[in-house]
Amino acid sequence: MLDRLQIVKQRFDEVSDLIIQPDVIADQKRWVALNKEYKDLKALADKRDEYVNLTGNIDEANAIIAEGSDAEMVEMAKMQLDEAKERLPELEEEIKFMLIPKDAEDAKNVMVEIRAGTGGDEASIFAGDLFRMYTKYCENRGWRTSVVDMNEGTSGGFKEVIFEVTGEDVYGTLKFEAGVHRVQRVPQTETQGRVHTSAATVMVLPEAEEFDVQIDMNDVRIDYFCSSGPGGQSVNTTKSAVRLTHIPTGLVAQCQDEKSQHKNKDKALTVLRSRLYEQELAKKQDEDAKKRSSQVSSGDRSAKIRTYNYSQGRVTDHRINMNIYDLQNFVNGDIQKMIDELQLVNNTEKLKEASEVF
């Protein structure tokens, strides 16, 4: 393991030197990538220092015990040895997980799209519940959310809502939320007290930077129209809403959240860029899924991933067969425990793949 950590230390020193070079600072794409690498490597370099100190302490303590000339020193050395031996396996596990190659997209911001599926009005209400759940979770994480586009349901909630999330390692955290979410409960409109099953689809798109996807604006048709929904007289009478159609792929993105046409166009372009990027990413994930069977990231966007059963107060994730009997707090944004478990399973799979490295 020390050999691997030594390579990390060398690369960390290289990157530390590179990010202050004027020619690197001038190349924005390279500088952003190196800064991200620096942050990841620094965490590993710190663990390496702890590992070196710990193994050094073990060697030193063993030497003092073997010599045995000073009883007090031997006693202190034994305590030091016990502490170091207790910490070492934990540290090795932490380092192993940190050495797992991260997906390049994990650090990106995201566009989250929630669409009501089967179940009529109840599906729209459930899509609204999911939107509130994610926005509360993001708020607790200190991430910023901003609605890009929405289509409200007739009895509340949303037929569709698209929002942007910005923060640290957003895609790496939220990517496991993509798929079909199912709810089983008695709808507010149900008079007989029967349990209905409805569904909503969640898509999590890594937000593409300008240098990730180049869009030729000659390939984009731009339509301007009046916004619908709240926002006062100016919103509903001026053509501030923007719809972009990417002619080669047929992908459409629109934004009507801002009062400014210019801001709406920028947001819609970000959505379009992210959809094009996600399309390429989906192909790659599909190829990866064929190479390895993964519990948590199959690449299938139509896979049923989670059920919210209100009568039992239960949330079940079908990919890892995990049940949480705390539905009320879960839908109020307390979803970290589930995300941690999904990340752990994913990392364990990756660790198994990379086991020959260790």
Image: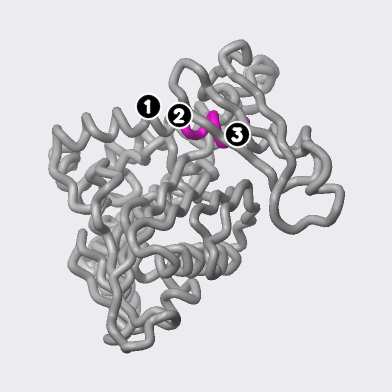
Residue 307 spot, x, y in % from top left: 28, 69
| Kind of element beneath mark 2 | helix
Quadrant of res 4 = top left
| Image position of 98 (left or right of 20) | left
Dot 3 amino acid type? Thr
Residue 344, by quadrant, is bottom left
> Does the stretch in magenta take in 276?
yes
Boundaries of the magenta span: 269-277
Is 295 placed left or right of 159 in the picture?
Answer: left
In what element is the residue under mark 1?
helix
Q: Residue flagged by tag 1: what amino acid is it?
A: Glu
- Circle on res. 277: 2
Image location of residue 210, percent across then percent down: 60, 25
- The residue pinned by badge 1 equals 280
Which of the two discs, 3 and 2, labels the residue nearer the N terminus?
3
Marks 2 & 1, CB-CB < 8 Å contact: yes
Q: Label 1: how many residues lie within 10 Å, few (<14), some (14-19) or many (20+)?
A: few
- Disc ID at residue 342: none
Q: Whole-percent x and y of residue 248?
A: 46, 16
On screen, residue 164 above or below 79 = above
Rendered view: 273 above or below 155 = above
Q: Which residue is mark 3?
A: 270
In this orientation, which residue lies closer to the viewer: 67 or 176? 176
